[in-house]
């Protein structure tokens, strides 16, 4: 199982980070050791100063596929959920400034928190999904899948040109604006529509 992530997929998030958007999806990967399953707290590492939450829509791959046409991409995922891409922001900024790879600030152990998944047939419109994040009861992020620069179908078509998609792979589709730091004792709650799918304690 692999975790495929898309960066800068919401225009306003790119603006808040002062980064340029790409014409094609910006892809990076997380190993399976990055997975943080539902009900498990996020333990703040000691090797960076600031760890940010980034709430994202995630999709679960349900068929083996390679070189998938965008028209047929909807056949290759069966469920949607929420994830948090935890990011060592201060370390990322240093690495980006130095022009160096930044996997360690994005792909470290337990950096990919996921919720339980919802059958895609139980949601009204994949292209119009509202989601939001609360930090200690205060709303910090709100987004809709219609705001994504690259849709899930386009992402699947693009990624499958380079990587064979396998059953169980997870795709993180990028975060809307409002990212911020976490502190020990925080509680993060993620909602897909009105349904709470994520509840993470920071320790």
Image (spheres, helix red, strand yellow):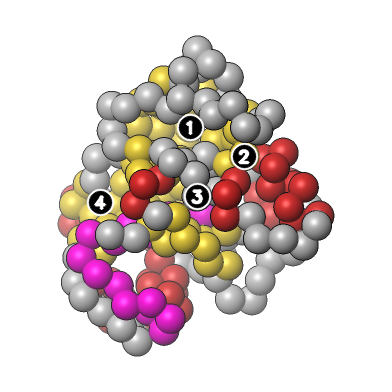
Residue placed under numbered mark 3 in the picture: 107
Question: Quick check: 187 above or below 76?
Answer: above
The residue sitting at the top extreme is: 185
Q: Is residue 53 visible?
A: yes
- The residue shown at (70%, 42%) is 91
Residue 48 image point, x, y percent: 65, 33
Between 89 and 11, the residue placed more toward the observer is 89
- Distance Cα–Cα, label 4 vs label 1: 19 Å
Residue 87 image point, x, y percent: 58, 41
Q: Is residue 148 visible?
A: no
- Distance Cα–Cα, label 1 vs label 2: 19 Å
**Within the image, what quadrant is residue 165 found in?**
bottom left
Left or right: 15 in relation to 27: right
Q: Decide which of tag 2 and tag 4 comes sooner along the chain.
A: 2
Q: Decide which of tag 3 and tag 4 comes sooner along the chain.
A: 3
Residue placed under numbered mark 4 in the picture: 123
- The residue shown at (35%, 87%) is 67
Regarding mark 3 in the picture, which secondary structure is present there? loop
- Distance Cα–Cα, label 3 vs label 4: 30 Å
| Residue 133 tag number | 1
Instruction: Check if residue 125 falls in the magenta segment.
Output: no
- The residue shown at (53%, 66%) is 27
Q: Decide which of tag 2 and tag 3 comes sooner along the chain.
A: 2
Left or right: 92 in relation to 99: left
Regarding mark 2 in the picture, which secondary structure is present there? strand
Between 31 and 124, the residue placed more toward the observer is 31
Mark 4 crowdedness (10 Å alpha carbons): few <14, some 14-19, many ≥20: some
Residue placed under numbered mark 2 in the picture: 88
Residue stretch in magenta: 160-175
């Amino acid at each position: 199982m692999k975790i495929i992530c898309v960066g800068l997929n919401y225009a306003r998030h790119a603006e808040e980070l002062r980064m340029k958007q790409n014409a094609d999806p910006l892809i990076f990967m997380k190993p399976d050791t990055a997975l943080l399953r539902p009900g498990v707290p996020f333990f703040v590492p000691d090797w960076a100063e600031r760890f940010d939450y980034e709430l994202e829509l995630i999709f679960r791959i349900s068929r083996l596929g390679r070189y998938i046409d965008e028209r047929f991409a909807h056949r290759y995922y069966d469920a949607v959920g929420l994830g948090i891409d935890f990011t060592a922001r201060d370390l990322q900024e240093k690495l980006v400034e130095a022009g160096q790879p930044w996997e360690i600030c994005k792909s470290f152990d337990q950096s990919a928190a996921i919720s339980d998944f919802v059958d895609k047939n139980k949601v009204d419109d994949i292209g119009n999904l509202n989601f939001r994040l609360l930090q200690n009861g205060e709303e910090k992020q709100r987004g809709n899948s219609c705001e994504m620069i690259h849709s899930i179908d386009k992402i699947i078509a693009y990624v499958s040109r380079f990587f064979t998609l396998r059953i169980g792979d997870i795709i993180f589709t990028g975060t809307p604006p409002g990212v911020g730091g976490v502190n020990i004792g925080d509680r993060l709650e993620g909602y897909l529509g009105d349904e709470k799918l994520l509840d993470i304690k920071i320790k």
